[in-house]
Structures are given as C-alpha cells and as structure tokens.
Image: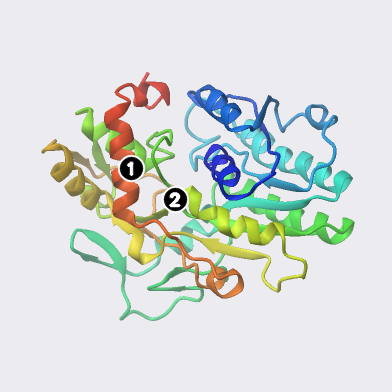
Amino acid sequence: MGSAIASELIKAKEHVEIIGLDNLSRPGSQLNVAPLRALGVKVRHADVRLASDMETLTGIDWIIDAAANPSVLAGVVGETTSRQVVQHNLDGSINLLELAKRTKACFTLLSTSRVYSIKSLCQVPVIEKNGAYVFDQDSSLTPGISAAGIAETFSTTAPISIYGATKLASETLALEYGSAFGFPVWINRCGVLAGGGQFGRPDQGIFSYWINAYLRRQPLRYIGFNGSGYQSRDCFHPRDLVPLLLKQFHCASEPEQRIVNLGGGSANAMSLRQLSDWCAIRFGEHPVHSTTEARPFDLPWVVMDYRLAEKAWEWAPQTNLHSILEEIASHAEANSDWLRISAAYD
C-alpha cells in the first residue's frame, strides 16, 4: 500500500518530495525499491520500531503511517509473535507520532476494518444471494450497520484480534498526540485493498493470492461456513486513497470527522465462490475444495460503509471491481513466480 500511494502521489502532485521508510521484512518488498527510486522517492532501509532510525528526518510536512504487520492472524498463527505484532504496529506508530510532534507534521494513520468487534460481526444477519452472503435487510437493525456496510459507530468491543487491537490503540494515541501537541491527525479505516503487484497470502491480500493461485493451478479451498465459499468482502484500489490524502494534507480547518471508513462498498463486494467463478471464466476451470473447519477470526460478511467519508471529504472509490480483478490477473500472467516471491508458498 505504501508503495502504491507513493507512486500515485508522485504522479498527482508536482514538486513533492517523498521519503519512504521500510525495513524490507516482508518477502518481495525489496522489489519495490528500484521502481520507487526511479520515480524520485527517497527509499531508506529503516525500521519504524527504532526511534533512532528517524532522528535525522527534518522538514517533514506530512506523515502517512502505513507500516504494520497487516494480518489478523499475526501473533496467533505463524512465525510472528504477539510481541512482534505490538512492536510493529503500535510501537512503530508511537515513534512516527513522536516524529510528527517534533516536526509539527500532519499525520494520517491508515487503519483497518479489523478494529470492529469480531463477536458483533459474526452476529450480523446475512442471507445467501447469487453465491455470496449479503446483508439481510429484513432483519432487525444492529447499530452501526446496514446494507451499505459497517459504519464508524459499529462496536469496537474486544475481541478484535491482536492486530486489530494494536491499530485501535494507535488510533487513540494518534488523536491524543494531535490534541496534546497541536498537529492535525486523520484516521482512515481501510477495508480490503487490492490491485496489480500486491503481494498475496491467504491471510492478507486475498484477492491477489486467490487469482495467482487459481491461475497457477495451486490447491485452493473454502474454509468454514459449511465449505460454501460464500464469505464476502469488498475491496478498493490503493490509488483511490490519493485524492483523499491530498485533501487531508491541505485541510486548513478542523474537520468534524477525524475517523472515516474507506472501502469499495457493496458495489465492489464479492465472495470467494464468486471470485472462483470469475477466475474460471478468465483462466479456465480449476477445482476448489472445501472444508467445514472453523477459524476464530473468519467473518461471513465485511463491507465498509464509506458514506461518512463521502459527506466529509467528497470521497468515493473510483476503480470498479472488474478493473481491479483484471489488473491483478494481468500482473499474475506477466509474473509467473509472484506467489513464490510473496511467500504464499515455501
């Protein structure tokens, strides 16, 4: 996401100087360095967990905090420990907030839909329609949710995962830092982002992972929800963030809404089964297996209601779902080893 935003900012704004910090810990991230430098981005091998790595930064006008271990399974499943997740996601944000405090920079935190309560989201009433779960509009309404998606007022009561908790804590600290030390702060809670060149893993970057794996005839399976594949997500392209970021950079007044949801909305939502159907048309048939195994962080339906961002910032996603999927597919066809590069397979 950081690489995509940096590239689009260079295109959208003249005379902007971008410094990118990355510890290059994610497999494949080193591939971003040369293209970004070719665009004029000053990429530094640095780690936001280390305050000393930012001591030499001066004259900073805007900080975009996009640094995180972005998997809801991080710290619970896999090689990353819970302490490492906290260090990456919360300690890193604190160090960037200290930088904003020192330089009086505008601060934008790219947060996540995973700040919302897992228990409450599991209880959202859904029905199956055309091979996907959709919101049941005939049910009694739950506060903060509608057919338009999850609103900012939806419950953030734990459990929300260790990953979600670190981002929610980062949000609170960012707002407190901004209030205490007099610099502007905005929180953008992003749903699933997707596009060509995204690293794909089953736990993060699901659209990229699924399309690349389907094309390469790798094993795929629907997990949970009776093995139906009806679980649904919306997505949007990271370049669609840039018009909003530019408005936030140059906002001279204090907007009433500091926290907004961003996503593709119901128009850009799709289930895994529908994604498989799209892949079958695009690449030819490939079997997808099923298991009824249930996982604690899986949710049946997550769609972001971005109407508050539309009202406050005149923001809406610009890239439709088909264009996003086609971009990923074209990139997958041009990069046969993408799954290996992004460590979806060992």
Looking at the image, which is closer to me, 11 or 261? 11
Q: Which mark is residue 73?
A: none
Residue 332, how many percent across, how many down? Answer: 30, 32
Residue flagged by tag 2: what amino acid is it? Answer: His
* Residue 199 seen anywhere in this rendered image of the structure: yes
The local secondary structure at tag 1 comes to: helix
Compared to 164, does 182 lie above or below?
Answer: below
Coloration mode: rainbow
Q: Which residue is mark 2?
A: 237
Q: Are marks 2 and 1 in contact (CB under 8 Å)?
A: yes
Q: Earlier in the sequence, mark 2 or mark 1?
A: 2
Dot 2 falls on a residue whose secondary structure is loop
Q: Quadrant of residue 139?
A: bottom left
The percent coordinates of residue 178 (x first, y second) are 81, 57
Q: Residue at x 75, y 54 (%)?
A: 174
**On the image, numbered disc 1 is attached to which residue?**
327
The reply, left or right, for residue 119 in relation to residue 308 is left
Please name the amino acid that badge 1 sits on: Glu
Q: Nearer the viewer, residue 197 or 95?
A: 197
Q: How far is the residue under mark 2 from the one under mark 1?
A: 10 Å
In-front residue for pair 116/24: 24
The percent coordinates of residue 186 (x first, y second) are: 69, 59
